[in-house]
Amino acid sequence: MSDDHTLPFDFTQKKPQDEPRPMTVAELDRAIRQAVDDGFAASVWVEGEVADSRPATSGHLYFALKDEREDASVDVVLYRSNVTPRTRALCVDGSRVRLRGKPTFWSPRGRLQFVADRAQAAGRGALLEALERLKNKLLAEGLFAPERKRLLPQNPRIIGVVTSPSGAAIHDVCRVAFRRGGARILLAAAQVQGAGAAASICRALEQLQRVHGVDVIVVGRGGGSADDLSAFNEEAVVRAVAACPVPVVSAVGHDVDVTLVDFVADARAATPSQAAEMIVPDRATQRSLLAHTRLHLARAMHAWLASKGIGFARVAQRLGDPRLAIASRQQTLDDRMARLASCARSLVTRRRDVLSLSQRRLAYLHPRAAVARDRAELSRLTDRLARAWSGSFERRAATVGRAGARLDALSPLKVLQRGYAIATRSDGRAVRSAGDVRAGDSLRVRVLFARVQASVTQVEALDDDPSALVPAPGASKDPG
């Protein structure tokens, strides 16, 4: 192990004059951006898979472009001025696109990004995939549901047409409509292909919706390639047709051409001419049908009147004089009116009796009556309680008086009042006989209103004392 303790990097402080001037972050960002811009002076095309698509409220479109073969990706931004509805539909997650633009370094976040100005589908498969995803999305929302389809008007007076004013579609619609009987055609000119076609179609639909009296709207154009018809696959156009309050007929392209507008429209026509035939009824056919219907209706009415006349005659014959039938019904009515009046009176009487009984019961249960009854009962119980308490008190007072008299009779104070005294030794025991005391003992003598401290000088036993005389120590047996 080497004894060299030198660090791989020299963290020792150097003199200020030896240190190079550090770059600021802004200077470093500008240097990187300049290097990137110098390296890509011209626009380049890049192809990859869209991921993490994030449309912003500002109108810009942000997403990442990933390499399908290697683990590599680059952030992409499409500014609002370069974003079209078709571009927005193409640049969704999972689609493969080809972008034209330049890479640049965005200083505020220190991030390399690709600023695109044009987007193309990377082959027909990617375009169809994006179209299929949009179709499934709209299908899931219920925009293609059959129950949303509305019936076309039978005799429209004003037909709105959204198409190019210079195309053959408007001429076909006018020709067929005038040939079949005539109708007012109101054209809302729109761009039907190219950049901005979807927005133009939406504006034309909105203009027709503001016109009062438009009965049906035809949206279409002549045939063309898939790119020519792409405007009718835009989500904005499909939603505008779905939100239109007037029934819409789709007439885009030829019979083999199918767009998303065909699914959301209330009816689909293979061509604009067929759309006019569907909407405008044939006046000659209507006249013939009307004449035939009128003749058939007249014959039917005559036959119906004849059959009803025979039936009325039979009924009148069976009915007879209507005055008798009316009089009979009037008699029945009078009888039922009398019965009804009797029933009503009986019912009123029963209800009145029930009401009277209920009023009496309610009066008995009225709070004032209940309170009065309770007060009377309370007064009666109070008198009983007072009498019981007075009698008990008198009995207890008599008992206490008797016990007091007995206790007073047995009280030692009564004895003291008669002139007697009570002598107690020092241990508190009363002197009951001569044997309880000796000469020289100290005694307490209790008289009526005092205590006397005494000393025994002599103990003399009387003849009637059954206890033996115990002389006190030092006392003489001869008292004399």
Image: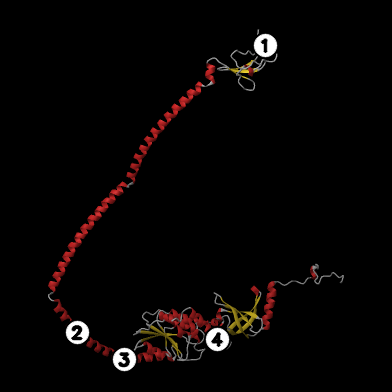
Q: Amino acid at mark 3?
A: Thr
Nearest-to-viewer mark from 3 and 1: 1
* Sequence-wise first label, 3 or 1: 3
The location of residue 397, given as percent across then percent down, is: 44, 27
Q: Is residue 383 above or below residue 323?
A: above
Identify the residue under disc 2.
307
Between 145 and 36, the one lying in front of the other is: 145
Q: Position of residue 17 (x, y in %)?
A: 80, 69
What amino acid type should be assigned to the residue bearing mark 1?
A: Lys
Q: Which of the pair 317/154 is nearer the observer?
A: 317
Distance of mark 3 from mark 2, alpha carbons? 33 Å
The quadrant in which the C terminus is found is: top right
Q: Earlier in the sequence, mark 1 or mark 4?
A: 4
* Mark 1 touches mark 4? (CB < 8 Å): no
| Earlier-in-chain disc, 4 versus 2 | 4
Q: Which residue is mark 4?
A: 127
Q: Amino acid at mark 2?
A: Ser
Circle 1 sits in a helix, a strand or a loop, which is it? loop
Task: Give the mark nearest the N terminus, 4 or 3.
Answer: 4
CA separation, marks 4 and 2? 71 Å
- State the image quarter where residue 342 is shown: bottom left
Element class at badge 4: helix
Number of labels in the image equals 4
Q: Which residue is mark 3?
A: 285
Q: Nearer the viewer, residue 445 or 88?
A: 445
Residue 189 lies, in percent from the top left, at: 44, 85
Quarter of the figure with residue 468: top right
Question: The N terminus appears in which quarter of the rendering?
Answer: bottom right
Identify residue for label 1.
477
Q: Within 10 angstroms of label 4, few (less than 14), some, or many (20 or more) residues? A: some
Q: Nearer the viewer, mark 1 or mark 4?
A: 1
Q: Residue at x 48, y 84 (%)?
A: 260
